[in-house]
Image: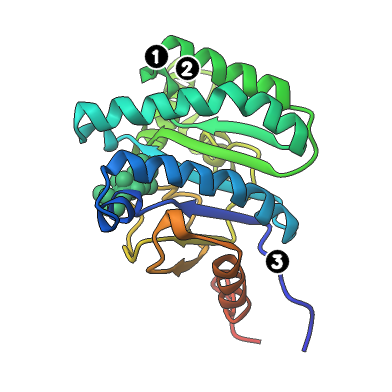
Amino acid sequence: MGEKKIPRHVAVILDGNGRWAKKKGRPRTFGHVQGAKTLEAMCETFWNHGIEYLTVYAFSTENWKRSEEEVGMLMNLLREYMKNAIRRAVDNNMKVRVIGDLSRLAPDLQESIHALERASDTNTGLKFTIAINYGGRDEITRAVRRLAAQAAEGALRPEEITEQMISESLDTAGMPDPDLLIRTSGEERLSNFLPWQLAYTEFYFTPVLWPDFDEDELVRAIDYYNGRDRRFGGVHE
Ligand code: IPE
Ligand code: IPE
Ligand code: MG
C-alpha cells in the first residue's frame, strides 16, 4: 500500500444547518450558529490533515430568496464572525479570501472583509476561501463582461481568449482547481457552486448534516478520494 494521497484543495458545500436545527426542535438560525462553530473547528482539522486550500460555500446568490429574518440573521452571523476573524487568522496563520459579488453586502461587511484579507495576506498556513453571495453563473457572467469590455476597447481579440485567461478572470484566480468536493446533508447537486472549477473534481456526498461534520467524516472523505482513479480524460493505468 502506498502513502495516502491528500487532496490539495477541498471545496465544501456546507449544507443541512436548517434540518439539523429542526431535528432538535429549534429555529433554523440555531443551526447556522452551530454550523459556524463547526466551520471554525474544521479549519484546523483540515490543515492538520495536510489540506492546503479549503473553499466553503457559505451564502449563495440564490439564498436571498430566504425569509428576511433568516437572511438578516446570516448577515449578522457573518458580522460576528468578522469581529474575531483577524485575530483568529493571525493565531492560526490562515490566509483568508472571500469570493462572490461583495457589492451587494452592507458597506461595513465589505470593509471588514477587505481588512481581513489584507491582514492575513502574508500568512502561510491554510488558504481559507469563503464564498459569500457567490453563484458560479454570476461569477462567469462578471468575468465575461470584463473580457468583453477589453475586447470592445480593442485591447483583446476574441480569438486570443484562452481557458487560462477565463480561469484567471474568475474570483478564484491564482488558486488550483479543487481536487475533492464534499457536500453534506444528502443533497447531490452543485447548487451553482464553482461550476467551472469543478470540471474534473471528485465528488463525495454524505448524509451527515453540516453541524455534525467532524474529523471522522473528513477521514472518510479522504479515504473515498484515495479509492478514485483520476484519469482527466486519459486512460486507466
Ligand atoms: C446551509 O444550510 C447553510 C446555508 C445555505 C446558509 P441550510 O440552511 O441550507 O440548511 P437546510 O438545507 O435547510 O437543512
Ligand atoms: C447551497 O445550499 C448554498 C450553500 C450551502 C451556501 P442550499 O441549501 O441553498 O441549496 P439548495 O437549495 O438545496 O440547492
Ligand atoms: Mg440547504
**Label of residue 109 in the image:** 2
Residue placed at 36% from the left, 19% from the top?
104
Residue lying furthest front in this view? Answer: 25
Render colour scheme: rainbow
Q: CA distance from mark 2 to mark 3?
A: 34 Å
Seen in the picture, residue 9 relative to 168 is either above or below; the reply is below
Horizontal and vertical percent position of residue 82: 55, 24
Q: Secondary structure at mark 2?
A: helix
**38 or 118, nearer to the observer:** 38
Name the residue carrying label 3.
6
| Contact check, label 1 and label 2, Cβ < 8 Å | yes
Kindly report which numbered mark, 1 or 3, lies closer to the viewer in this rendering: 1
Instruction: Specify whether 126 is left or right of 185.
Output: right
Packing grade of label 2 (10 A; few <14, some 14-19, many >=20) is some
| Contact check, label 1 and label 3, Cβ < 8 Å | no
**145 or 38, nearer to the observer:** 38
Q: Is residue 192 visible?
A: no
Q: In which image quadrant can residue 86 be found? A: top right
Residue type, mark 3 in image? Ile
Horizontal and vertical percent position of residue 59: 38, 37
